[in-house]
Amino acid sequence: MSSLIPALNVRWFVSALSHDDVVQAAARIGSGVLTTPCVPSPELSDRLGCSIWLKLEYLQRTGSFKERGACNALLLLDPAVRARGVIAASAGNHALALAYHGRRLQVPVTVVMPRFAPLIKQSRCQALGAEVVLAGDTIAEAKHEADRILRERGLSYVHGFDGPAVIAGQGTIGLEILAQCPEVDAIVAPIGGGGLIAGLALALDGWSRPVELLGVEPARAASYSAAVAAGRPVPIAMQPTLADGLAVPEVGANAFAIARGAVSAVAAVEESSLAVAVLRLAELEKGVVEGAGAAPLAAMLEGKFPGLAGRNVVLVLCGGNIDPAVLSRIIEFGLVADGRLVQFVAVISDRPGGLAEFAATVASVGASIKEVEHDRLFGSADISRVRVLCRVEVRDLAHRNRLFAALRGTGIEVLEQGGPGSA
């Protein structure tokens, strides 16, 4: 593979990339990248009707699988190129991975981030010794500035998902899965730019028994499905998504060329399922996983792959880098999508004891009040009654319905219900 390194700065076709390149990458990066656990999940297995295993890539030192490809790419550089340094445009995990392994391997790293890049990721990259340049409002504009700096300084560009060294490095996840769960029948992996699933395809090539490879992408950024429909990578219009790590406007040409013949099916998942998947992993597996990492579970929760019933299925949880403030919002969104956090307006007595009666009724069915806000100005003309905006935590939709029935049984009117299954 070393002969392909001069092409780091351009697009190329990697038809020569093979399973052997992944094996060599595994030997190369073994001392610098963690072998992450692949663990069974009895809880998820019971809920989903198949034997679920979780590949915990979010446990890498910088929180994502991107370390594998970044480490492999840096190790393949010749000494002169290493001395000059590398550059990449990235707002997230690839930038962190390059910064970390650049410091470890003494390779100067420059990362060009859009101006909107989270402050925590900017500061983490700087703390790891990378030069952080802020340019443009989009990753495309950041890439334009990275290309300018590359030409000016004679640096090498390390692509986040479409370089051969990066694809081979990501494929080492597949080799670990085969060793840790040799009876695996299917691997479900996220798709953004396609480097991960292309690497997995190479890793599975020639395995002694068939293993189905399935991809998942957010419905709001379905660049791989668009490429399949067009027969080649094409740019798409994206919308904001909880799986921001998968929000790539065009799948990589090289990654697509490798993956298209190996991926059995690709599912597009909704935002509500991504939020519920993040919530499930936090509750059941005690893992903090970002939206992109939770995408495989989101597809399973939506029932996107019914043919997996009763089989051994590995979900690749690719990353866990999520802003704590965003995490709290995703969890609340997940509770709403799961039918466990409901919002409604109740009309109660404005006389002494009215609010206490309301609270007692809620408590009587085992629900928990999270927030109550009185609205006296825009209520009805009946000044003896007042509207209250309520947020209440319940166990599920059936519990919510019991709550509403109990409130109505005491003469409390319930209006403007919010959340799944709302009337």
Image (cartoon, rainbow, N blue to C red):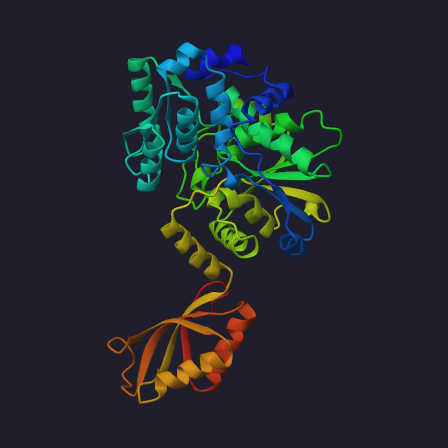
Where residue 385 sits in the image (x, y, percent)?
32, 85
Q: Is residue 377 left or right of residue 77?
A: left
Where residue 16 sits in the image (x, y, percent)?
59, 14
Where residue 98 sits in the image (x, y, percent)?
42, 27
Residue plotted at (70% across, 34% down): 211
Residue plotted at (36% across, 52% down): 325
Residue plotted at (39% across, 29% down): 99
Where residue 286 sits in the image (x, y, percent)?
53, 53
Q: Is residue 343 left or right of residue 296?
A: left
Of residues 282 and 417, the one nearer the viewer is 282
Relative to 381, is 197 above or below? above
Q: Residue furthest right?
A: 208
* Residue 90 in sight here: yes
Q: Is residue 255 left or right of residue 47?
A: left
**Number of callouts in the render?**
0
The N terminus sits in image quarter: top right
* Residue 193 in sight here: no
Relative to 278, is 182 above or below? above
Of residues 236 and 46, the one nearer the viewer is 46
Residue plotted at (57% across, 44% down): 296
Relative to 54, is 211 above or below? above
Of residues 139 and 119, the one nearer the viewer is 119
Of residues 162 and 99, the one nearer the viewer is 99
